[in-house]
Image (cartoon, rainbow, N blue to C red):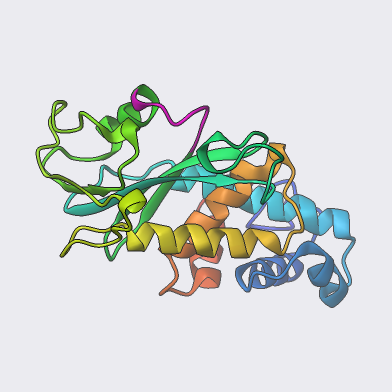
Amino acid sequence: MKRKNKYARRSRISEKKFRQLIKFFSLDLDATRTSEICNTNRNTVNRHFNLFRSRIARLCEKTSPFTGTVEIDESYFGPKRVKGKRGRGASNKTKVFGILKRGGKIYTEIVPDCKSKTLQDIIRGKINPESVVNSDGWRAYDGLVDIGYSKHYRVIHSKDEFARGSSHINGIESFWSYAKRRLQKFQGVVKHTFYLHLKETEYRFNLRKFDLYSILLKEFRERPLN
């Protein structure tokens, strides 16, 4: 029996409708607007969008080790202000660590804390020791030279230092701004789906110069969703 949809093995919608969903997902429309345009149940749209995000997250996790000039930084997602605490000490915020190849791709990872061991374990797994590593003055980055990253350069924001020649983290800070602006449109992402939305944002950023619709269509054609 011929499968109804070659892009998704268990989907009950037609290939034409499936391609529509990919198209509007690629255009970054939310599920509500997509359901209105496609005349499709919002829950159906949401379910497919989350399937797309799950596949995207798996693709993102295959990131190869970074080489060349990279920027590292951590950021905090959640309420803008928590009474009594701000910045790195703020509670109820999701902590995310990022690695950006300057002029290239980014990798993000949700972390339980921003302590030295946590961040340095990721750095050792994701960054080639020959790379030029740029960071701010956060103490978790103390000792990178001792673990093999001899080309580690820092800018100290607390001293109003944001760039020193080619040493800066402007690229990854721009990504954090982009990610937070993009996620604001969802008017609050629930914690159990934040990972998927984060990885989708990472994927969009990494493929910003390409046609996302064509890339996703090819991905699902070659490896259909279950």
Number of numbered markers: 0
Residue ranking furthest to the top: 117
Decide: is 208 above or below 116. Answer: below
Let me know if residue 224 appears in the view.
no
Residue bounds of the magenta highlight: 110-116
Q: Residue at x 26, y 52 (%)?
A: 155
Residue 119 location (% of width, % of height): 36, 31
Residue 100 location (% of width, % of height): 33, 53
Q: Residue at x 53, y 49 (%)?
A: 199
Q: Residue at x 15, y 46 (%)?
A: 131
Q: Nearer the viewer, residue 169 or 64?
A: 169
Q: Is residue 161 magenta?
A: no
Q: Say whether residue 140 is left or right of residue 225.
A: left
Decide: is 90 above or below 199. Answer: above
Let me know if residue 79 appears in the view.
yes
Residue 87 location (% of width, % of height): 54, 43
Q: Say whether residue 86 is left or right of residue 99.
A: right
Q: Quadrant of residue 30?
A: bottom right
Q: Nearer the viewer, residue 100 or 140?
A: 140
Q: Residue at x 20, y 28 (%)?
A: 143
Q: Quadrant of residue 139?
A: top left
Q: Quadrant of residue 46?
A: bottom right
Decide: is 83 above or below 118. Answer: below
Quarter in which the C terminus is drawn: top right
Residue 197 location (% of width, % of height): 62, 51
Q: Nearer the viewer, residue 87 or 214?
A: 87
Q: Is residue 114 magenta?
A: yes
